[in-house]
Amino acid sequence: MGTTDNIGGPVTQSALALSPMALLKAMRPLQWVKNGLVFLPFVFAVDVAWSTDDLGPVPGLLLRLLLVALAFCALSSAVYLFNDLMDRSGDRRHPVKRNRPIASGKVSVPVAVTVMVLLAAVGLVVMVLVEPLLGVSGGLYALINVGYSLGLKQVVLLDAFAVTSGYVIRAAAGAVAIDVTPSPWLYATTGAGALFIVLGRRFAEVRLAGDAAEDQRPVLKDYSGPFINQLLMLSGAAAWLSYTLYTVEATNLPDNNTMLFTLPLVTFGLFRYLFLLNNSERAEAPEQLIIRDLPLVLSIIGWVAVSTLVLLLNS
C-alpha cells in the first residue's frame, strides 16, 4: 500500500526501509572523480611539494591530500543528497531524473536527511583535523552549494559560476593541505576548464531536452538558442588559452617550457568533449563521458603520463 512524503509525492512502502545500493547511488560516487583536483597543487608545485626537505616526506603529503579528497567525497555526497531532496518533486517529471533514488522513493526522506547530516559532519571534521583552515574551504563549498540548491540554479549564469566555484575550491584546498602557493595560473586554468565543462552540460541539456527543456530545468530557457553556443565557444577558448599560458608563465613549472608537450593532449581532449556534447546521449553527464569514452580517457591518461614525465625530468 502506497503513502506520500511531506510534499505529496508518491512513495512506496518499501522506501521506508534502507536500501544500501540505492543510497550509494544517491550519493553520486561517479562524481567523486572531481575530488582528484585536490592533488593538482602537489603535482604542479614541483619546486616545493616534491621536496622531502621543505614539507616532510612525500608519502605524508599524499596521505593528507587523500584525507582531504575523501572528506570532499563525503561533503559533496551530502550536497547531492540535499539537492535531490529539494528537487524530488521536479525530478519526478524528468524522463531520467525520476529514476533517482529519492525521487523514485527507493531512499526515504528521513534516511536521506540522516545520511546527509552525517556525511557533512564527517567531511568537515576531517578537514579541520587535517588543517583548521580547510574548515573554511569546506564550509564555503557547502554554503555555495546549499545556495545553489535553494535558488541560484534558477538564475542564468550564476548557476554555472556556482558549480564552477566547487572545482576551484577543491584545488585551493589541496594547496592549503600541503602548505604551498601554486601559480595563480593553476586557479585560472581550473576555473576556465570547469566553466567549459559546466556550460557544456547546459548545452547538452538544451540539445537533448528539446522543447521540454524548460519543464526539466527552468533556467534552461535562458540558455537556449545562440547564447549557449557563444558561451561554450568562449569558455572553451578561455580554457585552452589559460592552460597554454600556464605552461609558459607559471614560475613553478620548468623554465624550458617543456610542459607545452602536453598541449596537444589538452587540445584533443577539449575538441573531443565538444564532439561528444554534440553527439553523445550521455552528454549531460560529464562524469560518465570522462570514464566511458575511450579517446577521452586515453587523452587524460596521456596528459597525466606526459606531465609526470616532464616534471620528473626537470625536478
Image (cartoon, grey):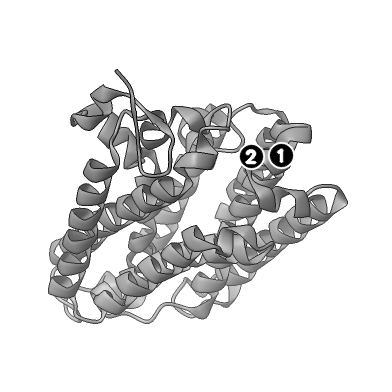
**Which residue is nearer to you in this view: 296 or 50?**
296
Amino acid, disc 1: Ala
For badge 2, the amino acid type reads Gln
Specify whether 49 is left or right of 89: left
- Say above or below: 204 vs 10: below
Image vertical order of residue 218 relative to residue 290, above or below: below
Number of residues whose C-alpha sits closer than 10 Å to that of mark 1, classed few (under 14), some (14–19) or many (20 or more):
some
Residue 46 x/y as whole percent: 35, 71
Q: Position of residue 84 (x, y in %)?
A: 42, 45
Residue designated by label 2:
216
Instruction: Choose top left, top right, bottom left or bottom right for residue 214.
Output: top right
157 vs 125, left or right, is right
Quadrant occupied by the C terminus? bottom left
The residue most toward the top is 1
How many numbered marks, from 0 up?
2
Q: Nearer the viewer, residue 92 or 20?
A: 92
What is the number of the mark on residue 213? Answer: 1
Whether the residues at callouts 1 and 2 have beta carbons within 8 Å, the answer is: yes
Residue 239 locus on image (x, y percent)? 64, 61
Residue 261 screen position, x and y as percent: 57, 55
Task: Kindly tell me whether residue 211 is visible in this rendering.
Answer: yes
